[in-house]
Image: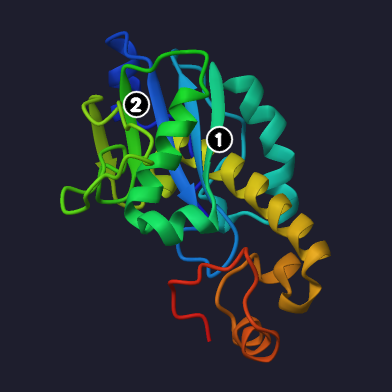
């Protein structure tokens, strides 16, 4: 497991006076529950808390222990969400743009540069999707940015966003499990395990399921 410090590109951006936000999503491939986007802002070259790494490489206990340290390290942080209903209505790609927009809207600090996990700029809505009148605006599409494939394993600020979003979404799924215990969301967090799909076939989907998806 690679423990992350600020990478050279992050240092260069900060040295130029950029206010950098790292963005990562959690729950994109889940069958149930919301999509979460974490946003973490840094504006100086202080190193992140020791032990920060790709959230997928950390144990749940280590992720939870890192969250207060990351919130103290960051200049600002926030979360943006899109519900299962919104994902069904808009499609996952547009819902991702809306959730990312909500995350940036929730910040108290205005970033000048974004580092985004993955190959696409998800602050920009997909060009092939018609935006209905009920879709919130996405005003950050032109924000200066870099997309980084496997960014949560390369960039400290993206990894921080990933950890914060993962811990928050896991807690939501544990709370939803109490309401819908048949599906094992306390363990599978809404992802499409064999047991989860079998429960959908046996019990039927809930309002937390993405009903436009192949569920069983």
Give how far across and how far down residue 160 sits, in percent: 53, 37
x 57%, y 71%: residue:
191
- Asked whether 204 or 95 is in front, the reply is 204
As drawn, 4 above or below 188? above
Element type where label 2 sits in the image: helix
Residue 115 location, quadrant: top left
* Image-based side of 69 in relation to 42, left or right: right
Check the image and name the residue furthest to the front.
133
x 56%, y 57%: residue:
57
Residue 199 location, quadrant: bottom right
Q: Residues within 10 Å of mark 1 (few under 14, many from 20)?
A: many
Residue 200 location, quadrant: bottom right
Residue tagged 1: 79
Give how far across and how far down residue 63 sits, in percent: 67, 46
* Image-based side of 94 in relation to 5, left or right: left
x 51%, y 50%: residue:
54
In space, the residues marked 1 and 2 are separated at their CA atoms by 21 Å
**Tag in front: 1 or 2:** 1
* Image-based side of 98 in relation to 205, left or right: left
x 35%, y 42%: residue:
97
As drawn, 40 above or below 24? above
Query: Could you say which disc has been placed on residue 140 in the image?
Result: none
Mark earlier in primary sequence (1, 2): 2
- Asked whether 189 or 69 is in front, the reply is 189
Q: Residues within 10 Å of mark 2 (few under 14, many from 20)?
A: many
- Asked whether 53 or 84 is in front, the reply is 84
Check the image and name the residue furthest to the top.
17
Element type where label 1 sits in the image: strand
Check the image and name the residue furthest to the right.
178
Residue tagged 2: 10
* Image-based side of 157 in relation to 140, left or right: right
């Amino acid at each position: 497991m690679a423990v992350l410090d600020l990478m050279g590109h992050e240092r260069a951006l900060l040295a130029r006076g950029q206010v950098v936000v790292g963005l990562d999503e959690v729950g994109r491939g889940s069958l149930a529950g919301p999509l979460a986007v974490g946003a973490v802002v840094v504006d100086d070259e202080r190193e992140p808390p020791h032990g920060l790494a790709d959230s997928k490489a950390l144990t749940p206990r280590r992720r939870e222990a890192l969250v207060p340290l990351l919130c103290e390290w960051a200049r600002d942080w926030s979360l943006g969400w899109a519900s299962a209903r919104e994902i069904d209505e808009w499609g996952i790609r547009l819902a991702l743009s809306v959730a990312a927009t909500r995350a940036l809207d929730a910040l108290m600090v205005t970033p000048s540069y974004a580092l985004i996990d993955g190959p696409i700029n998800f602050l920009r809505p997909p060009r092939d999707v018609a935006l209905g009148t009920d879709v919130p605006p996405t005003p950050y599409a032109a924000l200066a940015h870099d997309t980084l494939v496997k960014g949560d394993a390369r960039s400290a600020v993206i990894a921080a966003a990933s950890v914060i979003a993962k811990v928050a979404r896991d807690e939501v799924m544990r709370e939803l499990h109490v309401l819908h215990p048949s599906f094992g969301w306390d363990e599978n967090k809404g992802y499409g395990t064999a047991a989860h799909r079998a429960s959908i076939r046996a019990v039927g989907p809930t309002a937390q399921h993405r009903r436009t998806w192949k569920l069983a």
